[in-house]
Image (tube, rainbow, N blue to C red):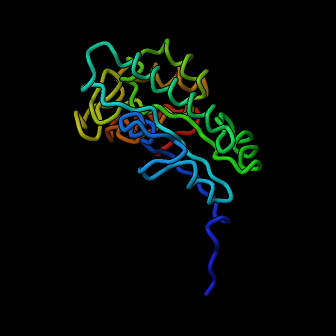
Amino acid sequence: MFVTEIRNIPYFDGHCDTIYECMGKGSSLRENSGHVDLVRGQRYGRCAQFFALFDNVRELPEGTAWTKLCQMHDWFCAQAAENADVMALCRTGAEVDAAAAQHKTAALLSIEGADLIDCDVHKIETVSGWGVRLLNPVWNRANVLSGTNAEEPERGLSTEGRDFIRVMEEYGIYPDVSHLSDAGFWDLVHMARRPIIAS
């Protein structure tokens, strides 16, 4: 029987809610009780992880989503600095390769749900500057951009949603179609000028 040691297996995952879980429990990216941490990532020959900036906006006080997102980003940056020996924030494939060559987890950022940036196209430039490379237009709840697979599933991308996608593309952020309604998915597929992702 042929057995491959785990350190020879490449690992690239498109989504985890580890930031949300760690902040809620007061734990760290380095070691925690969730499914993903940096110490375990060291077991792989190459390890890359998209870390989602996520919170349920409907459970936050009204008007605080952007503030909460900024807090999550600040926390993530502090974790990256504290754990620079085992992780590197990456924005490109070349940076992922460089992190792997140094045996560090290549950490990439996503945002799960445009509600966290108030569905505001003017905030896309800011989060692109943070290194965000994936963004879900919706989470489980419908918003001004589109319906979801769980709420208003018959509603596709609105005019605001189409404009939002165009600005995302301009800033090199890929739309993550997970959670979109079927109608929204097909609207996005037909208008997309760059690749789309299902994380």
Residue 10 visible: yes
At which x and y percent is residue 70?
47, 20
Q: Is residue 48 left or right of residue 183?
A: right
Choose between 199 and 40: the one closer to the eye: 40
Q: Position of residue 68 (x, y in %)?
A: 39, 21
* Residue drawn where x is 69% and y is 42% of the image: 85
- Please say if 97 is above or below 24: below
Horizontal side, residue 117 vs residue 56: left or right: right
Does residue 170 appear in the picture of this structure? no
Residue 95, quarter of picture: top right
- Quarter occupied by the N terminus: bottom right
Total numbered circles: 0
Above or below, comparing residue 137 to residue 5 in the picture? above
At horizontal 72% and vertical 44% (from top left) the residue drawn is 99
| Position in image of residue 176 (x %, y %) | 46, 38
159 or 41, nearer to the observer: 41
Residue 154 in percent (x, y) is at 24, 36
Describe residue 150's horizontal placement relative to residue 136 as left or right.
left
